[in-house]
Amino acid sequence: MSVKIILPQVLQVGGGASKEIGNILKSMDLHRPLIVTDKIMVQLGYTNSINECLSEVGIRADVFDDTVPEPTVSSIQAGVDKVRRGNYDSIIALGGGSPIDSAKAIAILGTYGGEMRDYKFPRIVNEPGLPIFAIPTTAGTGSEVTKFTIITDETSDEKMLCLGTGFMPTVALVDFELSLSVPARTTADTGIDALTHAMESYVSKKASAYTDTQAIAAMKLIGPNLRRAFHDGSDREAREQMMLGSTLAGVAFSNASVALVHGMSRPIGAFYHVPHGLSNAMLLPTVTEYSIPAAAERYADCARAIGAADYSDNTEQANQKLLNELYALNDELQVPTLKAFGVDREHFFGNLETMASQALASGSPGNNPRVPDVTEMIELYKKLW
C-alpha cells in the first residue's frame, strides 16, 4: 500500500540557513511578509537579523510579537486582525513551536475567517492560507515541517488539535545557530518532545517505511546529544544534531501521527499550564511501559536507536534498558512530577475523567500500539502524580 508524504516545498538545513529568507521570498515573488514571533526573539535580536536579511533584497516586514507559550484563541486574535487589515502576502514564523503554531493559525484564520474551533479535528484543513516561512529556534516541536497546530480554547481549557496541508509551512529554514541561546530548561523540554515525536511515530499504527527511516534517524541524533545540549548550550555539534533530529522527528510524526503520550499530554497542558514538552516528558516512561507489550520489537528498535541498548540485547533486555534510560533521562534533565510542578492534587484527581475523555477525543491515542479505554487512561494519569 502506498502512503502520501507531505513536506514543505523548501527545506534548508544548516548553520546560517535563516539568512536565506530574503532570497527565497524574492524567488517566490513575495514582497510583503508579516513576521510572527515573540518578545524574546525581539530582545535577542533575531527579529532584527531577519529584517536585515530582508532589507538586503528590498523587502520590508511588519512584526507581530505578541505570541505566547502554549498559544490560545485570544493570544492569536490580534495577529489575525493584523492580517485581515494588512496587505500581506506571506508570514515568517520565527521562534519555538508556539510562535510557529500561532503563525499557522493566523495564516488560516486571517485568510478564511471564522473561529479556531471551526478548524479543529476531525475537520481536515487542506485549504491553503498565506504561505508560511518557518524558522525554528528550538530543537523540539518540529512544527516547521508538520501539518499540525495546537491552539487552546481558554473558555473550555481544551487544547484543540488542528491538522491538514493548510497548516504545512511552505518553507522551513532550520538554522541550529539560532538554538545556541536556548536555556537549559527549554532545551530539556523541547528535546524530550522531539524524542517523543520520533518514538511515537515509529510505534504508531500509521507508521510507514518512509516515516520509519526518519524516526530512526531522529532517535540516533537525539539520543546521544540531548544531555550534551542540556549541560552545555554552547556545544555546537550537539545543538546541530539536536536541531536536525527534531526536524526529522517532525517529518516522521507529521506523516505517521503521534500517539498516546501526546493525547494524554494536551489536557495536562490545557488545565495546568504545564509546558507541552514537559508534560510529554512526564508521560513518556509511564506510557512506554504500558505500551511495550503491544509493540515489543518496535520499542526495542527505539532502545537501540537512542543508544540505550545494542544488538546483543534481546527484545526483553532492550526494552528494560529503554525504560531505565527514560527514567534516568527525566532525573538528569530535572523533569518534575505533577506534584512537584505545583498542580493541585484535589483538582487533578477530580478532573481525571474529563482529561481522559478529551485525550481520547483528540484521536491520537487511537494510533498507539495499545489503545486504552477511559478507565485505563485514568490509571495512567494517576501514576504521574
Image (cartoon, rainbow, N blue to C red):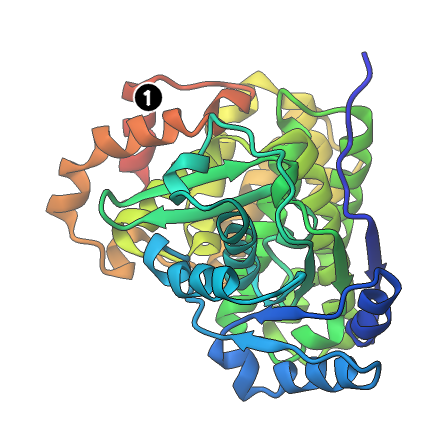
Q: Quadrant of the N terminus?
A: top right
Quarter assignment of residue 126: top right
Q: Which residue is drawn at 67% across and 69% down?
A: 228
Instruction: Please name the residue shown 41% across and 57% down the image.
Output: 71
| 30 over 255 or under it: above or below | below
Q: In this view, does 96 lie to the left or right of 32?
A: left
Q: Is residue 111 above or below residue 258?
A: below
- Give, as a three-letter code, the residue at label 1: Glu
Vertically, is 34 above or below 287?
Answer: below
Residue 22 is situated, as x and y percent measured from the top left of the image, at: 80, 74
Please state the horizontal and vertical placement of residue 73, each as a whole percent of the image.
36, 53
Report whether 311 appears left or right of 385: right
Q: Name the residue at 72% across, 61% down.
A: 243
Inspect this view and state whether residue 312 appears.
no
Outermost top residue: 1
Is residue 184 in view from this perspective? yes
Q: In which quarter of the image is residue 305?
A: top right
Q: Mark 1 points at which residue?
A: 376
Residue 321 image offset from top left, x and y in percent: 62, 40
Is 295 left, or right, of 27 in this rendering?
left
